[in-house]
Image: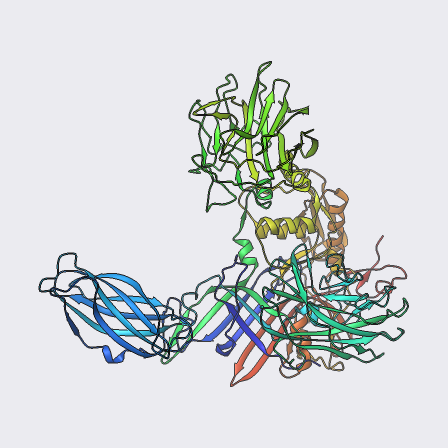
Amino acid sequence: MASIPKVTVEVAFDGGPFSSAYTWTDISDYVKVFQVRRGRNTELDRIEAGTLSMTLDNSDGRFTPGKRKFGDNVLTGSQGQYAWDLNGRANNSVMSTINVGQVDDDQKPRIMARTVYTSGAPVSCYFAVKWLDAGGAILRFLVGTRFVADSSPAVYTHEETPPAGVATAVVYIYADTYPEGNAGLTAYGEKAEWYKTQPYYPNVVPRRRVRVRTANLTPKDVSTGGDVSHSSAGFSTLHSPGVNSSWAAVPKSGAGSVRVDCGTNGAADYASSVYCGYVAGGKPVGLARVVGGQTYSVRAQVRLGASSPALNVKQLVRWYDANGAFLSSTVDSPTVSLVSGQWVPVTLSGFTAPSGAAWAGLSLGTSGGDGGGSGYFFVDEIQFEQGATLAEWNPGGSIFHGYIEKWPVTSEGLTATVAVSAVDGFSVLSNTDLRAAMQAGILTTGPLGYWDLGDPLGSTRLENLANDQQPAKLVGSKYGPGTPLLGADSIVKKDATTCYSLANVASNQGTVVDVCDGGARNYPLGTDFSVAFWCLPVRPSSGLYTTLFSGWSDTAADFLWIRLDSAGKLQISTTYTEGTQTVFTSNASLSTSAPSFVVVTIEQGTTRLYLNGVYQQQDAGPSPTNKDIRDVRWASFAGRQAGSLYGEYANGRMAHLAIWNRAIAFVEVDAIWRLGDNGGADFTEDEKARIDRIATMANFLGETAYDAGKSTLQGPDWSSGASALDELQQAAEDASGYIFMDGDGRLTYHNRDRRQGAAVRYELSDSRGLPYEPGLQFEMDEDRIINEVSYKRPNGTEGVLKDQASIDAFGRKSKGIELRLTSDSAVQDAAYTLLNHYAKPVVRCESVTLKATATPALFLVALGVEIGDRITLSDLPSQAPESSLDYYVEAVETDVSVDGGTLQWVTSLALSPAENSDVWVLEDSTLGRLDRTAVLAY
């Protein structure tokens, strides 16, 4: 049974939205009220960004943006005017000395200030603080903030953090020099100040992370009851101890538990087990965030299957670093013998996270046997908390995870509050623009340098898109008439003749684009290197060749050159540090009518060529003894530097030059080629892959939870400037799914199967001890009737479907859809589905309210329910259409206040009817029922 939870509100004051390193600070004691809303108004809307509104007690000003001083001024005895005779003084002499007295050893910054001015001439000054330990030994005494005082009184400030072990301090102001002399000069000081800094100064700024969660660190889809069939990536099975990548996701089953089938895996410990949270592709899935060096405790409830042989289980915790790499495991918990029909706890308490740990997951498995192939058990109520002991169980996970937008301060007499407003991760994605699909695809591979050679019109420079902090420079050649054309279109546009022109087509005197800055070694390399570019060449005359790419080393010789001969074939040469050189000529020729994508990789002594996404060939040797290649001091594109001269100019059009200090993989070559060829029109993939790709392009570093893909989408057609959020939502809608940020801050995709035969996750009724508030409103209106659907597929079918009977009864109610799918029939199916669901009005109940404080059992629902869950309202009054009705949750709204220390918690769920959502399947245990929620299909 869930208890009233301990709710924690935390802010990461030390990290922005794109930082992977941040620390949560608990501000729960200052929270007076908060409201959270996530979801959408109806099932036909897009899910928008979730919001958090929160009121904080700001009586001491700790949440005031820009406020530095905290507490009382320690130097109240030094407020009057003090005069310092500087006549004839030497340079660097003490002007003012104040004994601060006792200083707390808290390593928190101190702010000191004083009003200083002179009788006329200026004096150059500086602060210095002498920090002393309890025995009077000097811990630190350094020159601090410098300033110049003159005849105008001004406040000068210094900030410094005391060293560890401090007990007392003395603050000095020194007269350093006298720019206009010091004859007859007097300086004055007033209003000395010494304060601690505000606890969160200077980090009370927008875009700080904020989350609202319970004490249970486990994500709610792992820890709370209910069925999340079709999707839940919160669990995985493992049948090979020690292997941490060969997992298969398993759903929760039944009324709020996970079934683990032991199989025939033997008697070894954990041979049959379940991982509650794991790492997939370097990303955490269902893991708890932890801090190295802290103490934690974990417990899970486990029950033996009704027909299972006897089983014993135990558990351990697995630690991962911030990149998802496995670090270590804890010792095993005590072994527990399971009991049929009874939940028993498996507990491990008081263990410490290792240094570098950022995530933790639970591994729970058998000990001593697998039940001979017929053993199985259930897991539920997983609790993972910081501390040596566990609280009474309550569901885990976050209610909200997002980013603060504003810190407005309101002051009323002696009291003050801050009305914080925050939004979830959708806000970051909505403000993230994607470059063209191929450009974004190249950038996700982490190139050393990337130049598209066709930046948008109005650009003032050609830039290194991969790293603006240390941009490699593109400079025009010292010889030749051509210049880089700002604003020229990319070569992979439909019009392939409008990219960066390397030379006049009638001349061989072109432009060399130099990569690197003034010959400096910007790209030190080891054994591996890759270069890629697009090229629409003009072939040289018979017997001649031109250079497409030349990489210079620190010995002023080429370590790599790529040439084009008169037959359109590529000649590729690699020279290693020891002097070994390999040369080979491509079998294939570059087209002169369509752009070609050229990739050359060097890896551990082998050079390979890829052309238009296809591996062509590699060098035939000789193999070097030392496989190091020479450092790139200078590289040239579309020509070659020889001393101070340029030659071997390429002729034609080239674009999208990228270089890497590694050998890029074929899958990367293939993706860049398909994203660029024909504008990416042939780059088809399912919606899950597209969503994952867009999230990566948008540099989304958070957790994700994606259902399996169900549709094949057309190639990405966005241009530079597309919103990452718009493209994510469009990809989901193309496949008739939806995407949102869950309460744990995970980017979550639900495919269309979620609403076809979904099992009920919660049943709310008085008889089950999960009461909802009276006053439900049932209605049937025409607002969501759709009886005419116009459909379209880009470059494909289009048409209109109608339900004439509905039109005759209710009038024409139209909706249009345009889906970027590869199949005409899939678009038509989506149109038929809309028409079938909405041609007739259905009974709706817009919302249901849960007062969890009055009935603590409701916290199981309030903390565990998620957008898309299916719930049942039963024990309905006789006036309702049925005694029980099924609904899908479209939005979750939580309103919490603290009144005199008493928590008041109300959760409201926005609902849509489950009627007509189920497809009837003969003899299926779940889908084989034919009732008011199911429809026949063929």
Residue nearest the observer in this picture, 286 or 489: 286
Q: Which residue corresponds to the image point at 55% horizontal and 59% vertical from the top-left?
A: 20
Q: Quadrant of residue 181?
A: bottom left
In the displayed structure, does residue 758 sit left or right of residue 659? right
Q: Quadrant of the N terminus?
A: bottom right
Q: Report x, y in % for residue 37.
A: 58, 67
Colour pattern of the rendering: rainbow
In the displayed structure, does residue 916 sit left or right of residue 500? right
Q: Is residue 519 above or below residue 272?
A: above
Residue furthest left as drawn: 184
Residue nearest the observer in this picture, 249 or 266: 266
Q: Quadrant of residue 704?
A: bottom right
Residue nearest the observer in this picture, 91 or 109: 91
Q: Quadrant of residue 70?
A: bottom left
The total of numbered circles placed on residues is 0
In the displayed structure, does residue 253 sit left or right of residue 620? right
In the displayed structure, does residue 75 sit left or right of residue 394? left
Q: Report x, y in % for residue 484.
A: 46, 30
Q: Report x, y in % for residue 16.
A: 49, 60
Is residue 585 at least partly visible in the picture? yes
Is residue 783 at least partly visible in the picture? no
Q: Report x, y in % for residue 92.
A: 21, 63
Q: Is residue 245 above or below residue 69?
A: above
